[in-house]
Image: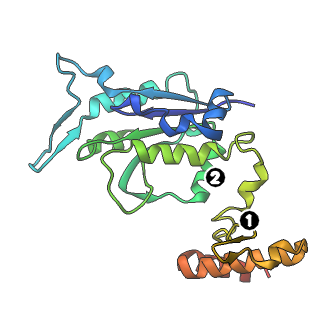
Amino acid sequence: MSIYKVKVVTLFPEIFPGVLGIGNIGRALKNKLWSLKVVNPRKFAKGVHKSVDGTTAGGGPGMILKSEMLSKSILESYKGIKNKSDYPLLYLSPRGKSISQKMIEKLSKKKGVVLICGRYEGVDQRVLDYHNVEEVSIGDFILAGGEVASQAVIESIVRLIPGTLGDDSSKDLESFSNDLLEYPQYTSPKKWKNLEIPQVLLSGHHKKIDKWRLEMAEKTTKKNRPDLWKNYKKNKTLSK
């Protein structure tokens, strides 16, 4: 099985692997189920100060990452890769398309991914246009940079690589499978602070347990994510 290759363009390479170096994800990295390469745009900057940013054209607050250094970093990330379509190029941005579990699943089936982490007020639009970069977002909120967001995306992808999780079948029962959120989970003791585990889960009757779990997943999804609930109902109707 080939190694899933992750390339990250960032001004702060010391942040990586970060949380990606612990638990199942870190173990998978150590066992070469996936690899990580970090490219720093400062490597291609000239001058004593190795400047990689400039003032905003047209005026405005903050600084913008320059296109030349980012472009060279992208080319460095694709070095030795024959088919670039096997390695999607993504820029973590609050104005990007919201990432879904389905998108993560598609990315996990590729040979790898290249992620650009922005900083300051963003990056020069021309580098995004020139390299046909897809902008993606992990939510409607602002971060100081794309590093934390990229690590979240990488973890989501890597955990789907066969062999990463202790039980690969567990990912099939998680939130967003079939447009449903996951049902509530419990463990011992049976009673804690006068709160008890639902009796059906202790019955040993697997059909009743499966029925309860589906009902709870439907209830939770309908309450917390009406958008997913709408898709679930639609797909359920089509499958009949």
Q: Position of residue 176 (x, y in %)?
A: 63, 65
Question: What residue sits 45% from the left and 34% below the top?
Answer: 8
Check the image and report above or below for 219 versus 105: below
Question: What residue sits 74% from the left and 63% below the top?
Answer: 188
**Structural crowding at the residue carrying mark 1, measured as other residues with C-alpha within 10 Å and reported as few (<14), some (14–19) or many (≥20):** few
Determine the image quadrant of residue 27. top right
Q: Position of residue 45 (x, y in %)?
A: 25, 22
Asked whether the beta carbons under mark 1 and mark 2 sit within 8 Å of each other, the answer is no
Residue named by callout 2: 105
Q: Which image quadrant: the C terminus? A: bottom right
Determine the image quadrant of residue 145. top left
Question: What residue sits 66% from the left and 68% below the top?
Answer: 182
Residue named by callout 1: 189
Earlier-in-chain disc, 1 versus 2:
2
Disc number placed over residue 17 in the picture, else none: none
Viewer-proximal residue, 52 or 171? 171
Q: Amino acid at mark 2?
A: Glu
Q: Of helix, strand and loop, which one carries label 2?
A: helix
Say whether residue 159 is left or right of residue 36.
right
Question: What residue sits 39% from the left and 29% below the top?
Answer: 13
Q: Is residue 132 visible?
A: no
Q: Which image quadrant: the N terminus? A: top right
Q: Amino acid at mark 1?
A: Pro
